[in-house]
Image: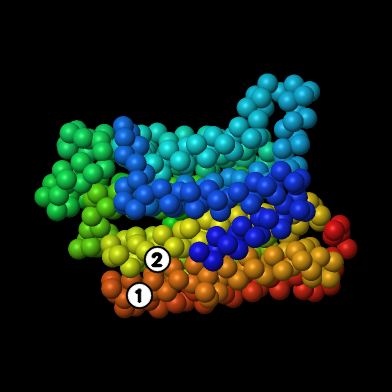
Amino acid sequence: MLSMIYGTVFLTVWSFFRASGGALILSMSLPLLSFMFFSMSSSPVMFCDGFFLLDYLSVLMVVMSFFVIMSSLVSSCKDLYFSEKVLQKNALKLLSFGFEGAVLTVFTCCVGVFCSKNIFCFYLFFELSLLPTLWLILSWGSNPERLQAGVAMMLYTVCGSIPLLMVLISSYLLTGTGEFLSMKLGFQGGLKDYGDYAFIVWVVMVMGFFIKLPVFLFHSWLPQAHVEAPLAGSMILAGVLLKLGAFGAMRFFWVLGSWKISAVYYFFLVIALYGGVLTSIFCLCQSDVKALIAYSSIGHMGVCLAGVMSSSNVGWAGAVCLLFAHGLCSPMLFSMAGSMYQWSHSQSISLNKGLLLVFPSFALCWMVGCSLNMGFPPSLNFVGEVLLVCSSLHIFSWFSVLLGSMCFLAGVYCLYLYVSVCHGSLSNITQP
């Protein structure tokens, strides 16, 4: 996959600038891990035992998570150094958890989500992933507003998590099982035979995952969290944690069905697509680099959700392609934005200009990242977007107009980001 190759090359080159030889060896080991996973078995289900299940979708998400977590550690040398100094001085006992411990705990929780075959095991890891992420934002964020960002993220998540837990418990009592496959057999033919209760279950589950994605109208916590989070926190949020919502939606849509005959189904679909268009327009109005990348993630997740809700093989294939590609491209952009912040001490686009004059090789990395994010052919983003446009025709032909508009706007704001950062006169406060 072209995005994986570009991401690996980027990590290999970037490790020369950001870390020691150990980081270079680590970045070169990433493709070896992915090939090891994909050659394990030719069966759709590679491993199934106890509470855990490993299929092709799980493997793809785990490999993507490994890429993101390791690249976030490679890119966060400053935060790692700060963590070591604090531990040596023992200035604050709570920080004994450590920066590396928080990042690796997030990775453990995400692997637990991707490999769970029980709904309660899934829910446990799904919610536990919030705590180390919140710790990263509150402990290593640089601005006082990080407290407000952490509270907003917590409130949004709790508002979706408690109703989700209630319907999971009621579904377990109704079907007598907590495993995805057994629950699907219990709900054979969809939940429509269970009347209004089934519809409430479907809506509550969908809302819980929409907040985690997030979909437009539930998105206000994400840009603020990205702006206030440290570099590793932003990379993990965009590359891994947003995918938990999409993965959960895919798992439970497979179990419950899509309810295409419902007006609420089309309402959610329109919100996802129309909201994606609006957030793409918001990207053109941003003056903060991290906020622009964060809003672009909301648009991409809306497109993925449309593919998942199409309940077609083409739509699901396009959603998986775009999820994996976005999981590599967005952390790459955040990593480069974090590097510019260390030079200029500002995240403003207007204060980070003229990069091509002083650092041409870094400007090349920006060109690659923006090209992948806009879906430049033959990248995996492009393949996913084409498949998603085709799947939208299966639902309603006008939806393809919204998707086409989003693809066009993605190209516009990616070009705007690249031109603003790499061209123009050099800012006076830039310190390359």
Quarter of image, res 348:
bottom right
Q: Are marks 1 and 2 in contact (CB under 8 Å)?
A: yes
Above/below status of 321 relative to 66? below
Residue 267 placement (x, y as % from top left)? 32, 63
**Local crowd size for mark 2, using a 10 Å CA cut-off: few (<14), some (14–19), many (≥20):** many
**Residue found 41% across the figure and 60% down from its top:** 320
**For residue 382, side relative to residue 399 (left or right):** right
Secondary structure category for the residue under label 1: helix
- Give the mark count: 2
**Residue found 37% across the figure and 49% down from its top:** 41
Residue 195 placement (x, y as % from top left)? 13, 49
Residue sitting farthest toward the right: 428
Kindly tell me whether residue 225 is visible in this rendering.
no
Kindly tell me whether residue 322 is visible in this rendering.
yes
In the depicted view, which residue is nearer to us: 210 or 67?
Answer: 67
Residue 296's disc is none
**For residue 264, side relative to residue 302 (left or right):** left
Secondary structure category for the residue under label 2: helix
Mark 1, residue position = 390
**Residue found 45% across the figure and 48% down from its top:** 37
Mark 2, residue position = 318
